[in-house]
Image (cartoon, helix red, strand yellow):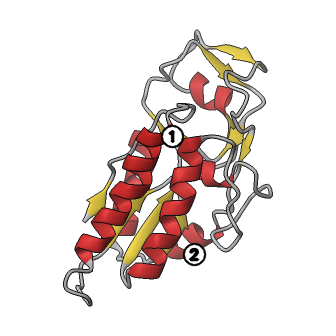
Amino acid sequence: IINCIACTNTYDENKEENWNVNYKGVVDLVDYLNTPPGTSVKLIQFSTDYVYAKSKKNASEDDVPVHDANWYSYSKVISEPYIELRLDKYLILRATHKPRPFIFDKALISQVGNFDYIDTVVKIYIDLIEGDAQGIYNVGTELKTMYDLAKRSRDDVVPTNEKFYDTMPLDVSMDLNKLKKFYE
């Protein structure tokens, strides 16, 4: 089962919507997959690199995620352990992917991460799924600023240091060594 249903408005202050979709929805799906107990269905869960927003730089899958001060990242952080505790077979994909071309007129030069365009990371998702990867994987490409990413698809994007939201994390860098080992 691939679960890519999510409330993805990362700075939405609506606790209930994030809670109901990103946490309760996962709980209901996991409980369904465990009926009857011992069901052998694997869950592939799309999470986010925002679970690392207040964590150390270049966080690995073994580091304790510390979410940013918003309901989106909080609801994603608390849904992951429920999956880990209740299912034997799962793949949690931590990433940020953007539509191509970049949809905003401005992009932060101070925000860094391993994010990329969906057409790039979807190939990684497919490889992990078809390769029967298990557990949690940080998914992304080389470290870059959001502005660097935006410039790959639009010449008219304006660089900025002005955060769009107070809770916008500036560093969502991830350790990609586990992903690199998967490809070896």
Front-most of 93 and 68?
A: 68
Extreme residue in the front direction: 16
Residue 66, located in which quarter of the rendered image?
A: bottom right
Report the amino acid beneath label 1: Lys
* Residue 129 drawn above or below residue 5: below
- Report x, y in % for residue 37: 25, 88
User: In the image, 44: left or right of 115?
Assistant: left
What's the residue at 70%, 48% (across, down)?
53
Report the amino acid beneath label 2: Lys
Extreme residue in the left direction: 36
What's the residue at 56%, 27% (across, down)?
152
Residue 63, located in which quarter of the rendered image?
A: bottom right
Q: Residues within 10 Å of mark 2 (few under 14, many from 20)?
A: few
- Report x, y in % for residue 167: 70, 34
Q: Secondary structure at mark 2?
A: helix
User: In the image, 28: left or right of 79?
Assistant: left
* 3D distance between C-alphas at marks 1 and 2: 37 Å
Q: Residues within 10 Å of mark 1 (few under 14, many from 20)?
A: few
Q: Mark 1 — residue?
A: 15
Front-most of 115 and 2?
A: 2
Q: Mark 2 — residue?
A: 181
